[in-house]
Image (spheres, rainbow, N blue to C red):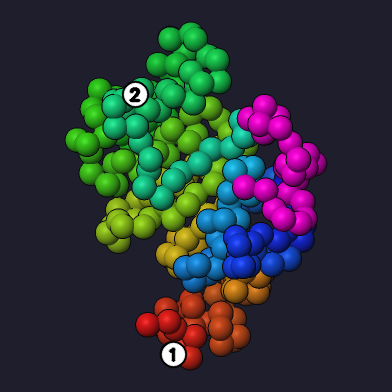
Amino acid sequence: MIDVAHIEKSFGTQTVLCDISFNVGEGESVAIIGRSGTGKSVLIKHLVGLLHPDAGEVRIDGENLVGMRERELLAVRQKFGMLFQGAALFDSMNVHENVAFPLRRSGLTDEVEIDRRVEDVLNLVELPGVGGKMPGELSGGMQKRVGLARAIVHHPRIILYDEPTTGLDPVVSDSIDQLMMRVRDQYHVTSIVITHDMRCARRMGQRVIYLKDGQVYLDAPADEVFNSDDPAVSRFIRGEADLKEVDF
């Protein structure tokens, strides 16, 4: 479903992605891990055509995004849902309006159908009856749940999660993990999770891609990654610094 082939990306003299290649099958769940600044967020922007590589190809369902016009990209983006790091809710809209936004943007005008689908996904993320609340009235965990509801309301085939548990306490993080797994299993969607949270990566990643210095350092089944005896991988998994590599 997703095929990334030899992409490279630089900003000025700084190379961020260097010969990145991987693929993700339909219904597969992949976690992308790595230190800050290794190109994870830049990579995910390539998958939806927000950035174009300097070299290489990004194919979604066989369609190469490189060189596509904006109208063509919009059609491809309809296949995606995305949970942003900060939930990225519209402050001026209540919860119902936030969740309904992708449906209205796609041209759906049947208010009964919109209400039904919004209610369904709010129930799925365990937030029934909050449609009239404003984002500022919600806790951080509740905002993430609303963001997840918005990401899935139009039944995407691929969901991208950008640091879904960042800034949340362990109990709330656990609840978000469980909701993401429920969405994955109930909707059979292809899932890509960018995270520094190793518990989240272990739960969501059938496969794990470890980025290091802008390259794919390891791409393997989750058990192989989490039991790796490679010092660079095992230190990252355990959260142990190599003082020779750390910039103070």
Q: Residue furthest front?
A: 12
- Residue at 62%, 47% (x, y): give it: 51
Residue 107 higher or lower than 129, as above or below: above
What is the spatial separation of the Cα atoms under label 2 and label 1, in whole angstroms?
A: 48 Å
Amino acid type of the residue tagged 2 in the rendering: His
Q: Is residue 203 magenta?
A: no
Q: Quadrant of residue 238?
A: bottom left
Question: Around disc 1, counting alpha carbons within 10 Å, would you say few (fewer than 14), some (14 to 19), or many (20 or more)?
Answer: few
Q: Quadrant of the C terminus?
A: bottom left
Nearer the viewer's eye, disc 2 or disc 1? 1
**Residues in magenta, as a range:** 51-76
Of callouts 2 and 1, the N-terminal one: 2
The answer to whether any part of residue 122 appears in the image is yes
Q: Quadrant of residue 100?
A: top left
Report x, y in % for residue 220.
Answer: 67, 69
Q: Quadrant of residue 230?
A: bottom right
Is 137 placed left or right of 72 in the picture?
A: left
Amino acid type of the residue tagged 1 in the rendering: Leu
The answer to whether any part of residue 185 appears in the image is no
Is 195 placed left or right of 142 in the picture?
A: right
- Residue at 59%, 68% (x, y): give it: 14
Question: Around disc 2, counting alpha carbons within 10 Å, would you say few (fewer than 14), some (14 to 19), or many (20 or more)?
Answer: many
The reply to whether discs 2 and 1 touch (Cβ–Cβ < 8 Å) is no
Q: Quadrant of the N terminus?
A: top right
Report x, y in % for residue 65.
Answer: 73, 41
Circle 2: element type: helix
Q: Residue furthest left?
A: 137
**According to the image, label 1 marks what residue?**
243
- Residue at 55%, 20% (x, y): give it: 106
**According to the image, label 2 marks what residue?**
96
